[in-house]
Image (cartoon, rainbow, N blue to C red):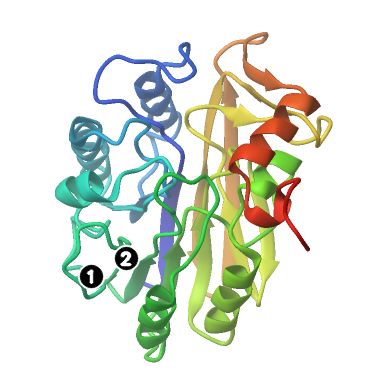
């Protein structure tokens, strides 16, 4: 197989019970509608690139594995999952292993259950590598040196058809001030791109920003899929943060030297806003939870 079709989903923010995201969004319904939107297509791979769960419960991961796994198998695909900042490593690993439970995954060495969730698997000549950019109890992202070494060791030998890299925090800038404060650490971003440069990585699949973005870095397209739980507004005042009640995803086709990205975004209604944080509230969130370099009391 020299082509690969991927359904890229992210930020499902599922609960183990009937709780609602921001007390209003039924994220299970959003996921069901997202799957229905592309249910007529066949896929080789389904990727859920982090913030799989909102509450970190084993029940939420089990529901997704059953729901998404069944849907994918009916379309000839396997599923790959990545850790996000809302996920819990212990329960994620309990249910989803290293993120590739449908394949003979090779997980990064280590016995501590709190260690990052990273894995690699090769199926039909296509390699998928999952990295864990989450920091427990933090919103912004980082990549430990052990993961970079794991990635470097895997990429040292090219896969027959190439590599798909999955990481929740994108190695590209955000669209708003809040999300930039919760982005991937800048030094870790540079280190990741250095490892990728000149390798067989065909595409990087990420989430976290809840809006569709595609940017080419180090010669590789980075695809940020819109969120399943809600859709962040792209071009409002960047000092504010808001989201609409909707869902989305992206269909990614790799054919030969080409990578085609077709995002989709659907509203649940015309007038429902999930949340809106004005600039003063965003500034407080950044000061409390942003990366140290973004906080008001930091020293440059």
Q: Earlier in the sequence, mark 1 or mark 2?
A: 1
Q: Is residue 169 in view?
A: yes
Q: Is residue 176 in view?
A: no
Q: Residue 268 sits in which quadrant? A: top right
Residue 258 position, x and y percent, is 59, 69
Residue at x 41% of width, y 40% of height: 86
Residue 28 position, x and y percent, is 35, 23
Position of residue 225 in the picture relative to residue 68 (left or right): right
Position of residue 243 in the picture relative to residue 176 (left or right): left
On residue 107, which mark appears?
1
Residue 118 position, x and y percent, is 32, 65
Distance in Å between CA atoms under marks 1 and 2: 6 Å
Residue at x 22% of width, y 49% of height: 90
Q: Quadrant of the C terminus?
A: bottom right
The residue labelled by disc 2 is 118
Q: Do the residues under discs 1 and 2 have CB atoms within 8 angstroms?
A: yes
Position of residue 166 in the picture relative to residue 184 (left or right): left
Residue 202 position, x and y percent, is 51, 72
Q: Is disc 2 placed on a helix, strand or loop? A: loop
Q: Give the crowd class for mark 1: few <14, some 14-19, many >=20 residues within 10 Å.
A: some
Please tell me whether residue 134 is drawn above or below residue 236 in the rendered image: below
**The furthest residue to the right:** 237
């Amino acid at each position: 197989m020299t082509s690969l079709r991927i359904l890229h989903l992210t930020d499902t923010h599922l609960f183990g019970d009937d709780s609602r995201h921001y007390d209003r969004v039924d994220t299970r319904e959003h996921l069901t509608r997202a799957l229905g939107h592309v249910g007529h297509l066949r896929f080789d791979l389904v990727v859920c690139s982090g913030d799989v769960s909102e509450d970190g419960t084993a029940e939420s991961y089990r529901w997704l594995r059953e729901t998404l796994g069944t849907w994918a198998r009916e379309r000839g695909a396997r599923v790959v999952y990545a850790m996000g900042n809302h996920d819990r490593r212990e329960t994620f690993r309990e249910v989803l292993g290293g993120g590739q439970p449908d394949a003979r995954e090779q997980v990064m060495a280590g016995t501590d259950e709190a260690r990052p969730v990273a894995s690699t698997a090769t199926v039909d000549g296509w390699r998928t590598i999952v990295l864990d950019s989450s920091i427990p109890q933090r919103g912004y992202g980082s990549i430990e040196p052990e993961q970079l070494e794991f990635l470097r060791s895997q990429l040292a030998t090219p896969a027959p058809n190439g590599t798909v890299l999955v990481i929740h925090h994108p190695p590209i800038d955000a669209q708003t001030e809040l999300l930039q404060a919760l982005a991937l650490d800048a030094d870790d971003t540079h280190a990741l791109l250095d490892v990728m440069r000149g390798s067989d990585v065909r595409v990087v699949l990420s989430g976290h920003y809840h809006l569709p973005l595609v940017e080419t870095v180090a010669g590789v397209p980075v695809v940020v899929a819109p969120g399943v739980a809600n859709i962040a507004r792209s071009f409002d005042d960047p000092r504010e943060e808001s989201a609409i009640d909707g869902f989305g995803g992206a269909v990614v086709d790799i054919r030969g030297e080409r990578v085609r990205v077709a995002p989709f975004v659907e509203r649940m209604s015309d007038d429902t806003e999930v949340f809106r944080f004005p600039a003063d509230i965003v500034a407080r969130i950044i000061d409390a939870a942003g990366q140290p370099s973004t906080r008001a009391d930091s020293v440059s």
